[in-house]
Image (spheres, grey):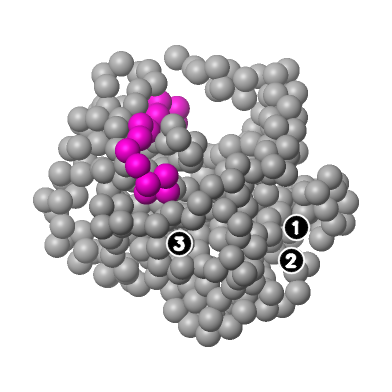
Amino acid sequence: MMTLKQKIKSSPFLARPAWFLYREVLLQRSRHPAKGRVPVFSEETRLTFSRLRTYEDFQQFSQDRVEELHDQERVESDLSPLQHKSFSISGTCALCGCDTTFKTNFDYSIRSSDGRSIPNFREHLFCVRCGLKNRLRAALQLFIQEFHPLSTQPIYITEQFGAAYRWLKGRGYAISGSEYIPGSGPFGSSPRGIRNEDLGALTWPSEMFDFVLSFDVLEHVPSVDACFSEIFRCLRPQGKLLFTAPFSPNLSKTLIRAVMQSDGSISHLMEPEYHGGNMIDAAKGTLCFRYFAWDVLPQLKEIGFSDAEAWLFWSRKLGYLGGTQIVIVAQKG
């Protein structure tokens, strides 16, 4: 049974006006984010993770943790009710620093090995206090926990409507964001205060940022090489890129779903997959070009990054579920 959100997105009559109104809400929120304190992680909320650099590292990681990974799968299966409806689980939000409730439902659910529907935990588990979903909470925690960014260090995040941008801005960071808004004006301009950028041809000066953050954006760009090169150019020496995206840990090479041809047409190598909203076609969402895999790490080093790692983690207590979660981190110089 379709949820109200899915019904609206699937309707050619409702999707466009609904997306327009939602964008206006996001615009106002980005201008006036809720303020809060930078979290300090205690022994109970600190996130432990594994650093891997190759597909072979992951194979060994999986062999060494067979029982642990089975236990994680069993925990997630047991959390899922038989009825396909919204539900909540208790836990601790490391960003809020206190116990909370994480909300989820069966939108975009996946099939378990025994045929049951399992929620897409990665895209859900919204904390009722801060409102952030699983993957954003985890990425922001690792960013602050491991890098200890100062309020004076410039950060670029590849969004300006998103919850991560608002959360960082509300905590006093020197944050700059952007959206890809074709037709709204030249790249580098800021119509209505929202900066318009093409990640494959950024207008930012070279060596401007200490950190670049990107959360589930890079799977949607036609040429990720161009984006990585531009991010590398805009980072200062010792600067760091931290990004999340759909990642297939059991594959050694990135799964290419679609390719943009030189004339701008799209060749679909698999059934088209669309995510979230779209500035151009609200009913469709944004086309997914790829699922990253382990070859992205040497790809980043070929661009010029001195090091690139995959950080793997899972935590029932902190609400980081959905199988082993992965954040990619690369350093310049």
Task: Report the residue marked by disc 3.
Answer: 144
Where is residue 237, by image quadrant?
Answer: bottom right
Q: Residues within 10 Å of mark 2 (few under 14, many from 20)?
A: some
- Spatial separation of the CA atoms under disc 3 and disc 2: 25 Å
The residue that label 2 is drawn on is: 202
Label 3 residue SS: helix
Q: Marks 1 and 3, how far apart in space? A: 25 Å
Residue found at the far right of this picture: 185
Identify which residue is drawn at 16% across, 61% down.
Answer: 63
Amino acid, disc 1: Glu
Which structural element holds mark 2?
loop
Quarter location, residue 125: top left
**Label 3 or label 2, whichever comes before in sequence order:** 3
Mark 1 and mark 2 in contact? Answer it, CB < 8 Å: yes
Query: Few, some or many C-alpha atoms within 10 Å of disc 1 (few <14, some 14-19, many ≥20)?
Result: many
Q: Kindly identify the residue that appears in the image at 15 percent across and 44 percent down.
A: 71
Whether residue 108 appears in magenta in the rendering, the answer is yes
The circle on residue 5 is: none
Q: Which residues are magenta?
A: 94-110
